[in-house]
Image (cartoon, helix red, strand yellow):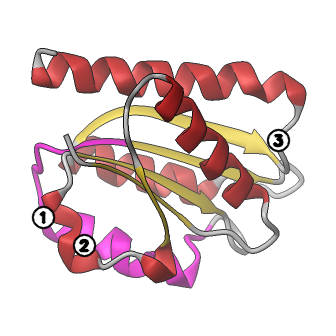
Amino acid sequence: MKIGIIYTSVSGNTKELAQLLHELFNRQTIKTHLFHIADFPIHTLSTFDAIAIGTYTWGNGEIPAEMEPLFREFDKIPQMKMITGVFGTGDSFYPHFCGAVDKFRDLLKINTDLAVTLKIELLLQKQDISKCKRFVELFANRIRTSCHC
């Protein structure tokens, strides 16, 4: 299976989270391709069997501008058989904590086989590691079930 992790990050928090998830997938012997959104060729999206999307939230719960083309691509291709997950970092000080994660979740729930979501407050803490492991475990289980591996 071809699995991608696509993320964006400004402060480095979501990048760190994406890198940790990438490492955890590797420990599960699941090879993933890690892409910063600027380096991901969106036209290849449909060649992936599974995608995990990582994003921060901008302003009042908005998807960052650089993630909009990816969001629109998922919106253009309804009912993909692709397995997806979405994760992100945010600040609960704002009214829509990880609002971009929620917007991706809502779209992916309708248009893909959404396996799992994950929200992290600001930056990774020791207590978040178990949540990250659970994210990977649930995502990996969906992949294994899907391919009957």
Q: Earlier in the sequence, mark 2 or mark 3?
A: 2
Q: Position of residue 39 (x, y in %)?
A: 45, 79
Q: Position of residue 112 (x, y in %)?
A: 21, 45
Q: Is residue 28 above or below residue 48?
A: above
- Name the residue carrying label 3: 124
Calculate the distance from the C-alpha at mark 2 to the C-alpha at mark 3: 29 Å
Rendered image: mark on residue 77: 1
Instruction: Look at 78% across and 28% down and name the residue there.
Output: 128
Judge whether residue 144 is colored magenta: no
Report the side of 85 relative to 58 (left or right).
left
- Name the residue carrying label 2: 73
Residue 130 quadrant = top right
Check disc 2 and report its element: helix, strand or loop: helix
Q: Amino acid at mark 1?
A: Ile
Closest to the observer: 77 or 44? 44
Discs 2, 1 touching: Cβ within 8 Å: yes
Q: Which residues are magenta?
A: 62-84
Calculate the distance from the C-alpha at mark 2 to the C-alpha at mark 1: 7 Å
Q: Amino acid at mark 3?
A: Leu
